[in-house]
Amino acid sequence: MSNESCVTCRFFSQHVGDAEYGLCRRRAPQPVGIIHDEPIAKKLFSLWPETEYDQWCGDFEPRRLATKKGYRALRAAPKP
C-alpha cells in the first residue's frame, strides 16, 4: 500500500495547531474575490488550496527528511 497523501508530500504545509488541514503549495496561490453586500467592499486576494492531510493528487512528491549535514550547511550559508 502506498502512503502518497498530502501529509507525506513535500508541497503540503500543515496548519499550526490543526493536524488535519494544511495548504498545498505546489503551484502559485490562486486569486479569489469576496464581494460583500456593500458595493464598495470588494476585496481580491490570493490563497493556496486548503486540503485535508489524507487527500492525494497526481502531483505528489515525497517529503525529504532533513539531515544533520543538510541543516548545518543551511545554517552556514551566507544570508542575503
Image (tube, rainbow, N blue to C red):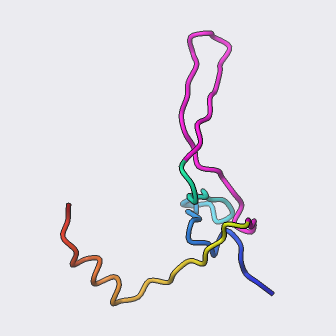
Q: Position of residue 71 (x, y in %)?
A: 33, 82
- Against 9, residue 71 (above or below) is below
Q: Position of residue 35 (x, y in %)?
A: 65, 21
Spot the residue most to the right. 1
Q: Residue at 75% across / 65% down in the picture?
A: 55
Q: Position of residue 62 (x, y in %)?
A: 60, 78
Q: Residue at 69% across / 57% down in the picture?
A: 51
In the image, 6 versus 19, the foreground residue is 6
In the picture, the quarter occupied by the C terminus is bottom left
Q: Position of residue 36 (x, y in %)?
A: 65, 18
Does the magenta run of residues contain 60? no
Q: Quadrant of residue 69?
A: bottom left
In the image, 10 versus 51, the foreground residue is 10
- Against 69, residue 17 (above or below) is above
Q: Quadrant of residue 56?
A: bottom right
Does the magenta run of residues contain 53? yes
In the picture, the quarter occupied by the N terminus is bottom right
Span highlighted in magenta in the image: 29-57
Q: Residue at 62% across / 34% down in the picture?
A: 32
Q: Residue at 58% across / 60% down in the picture?
A: 26
Q: Is residue 43 left or right of residue 71?
A: right
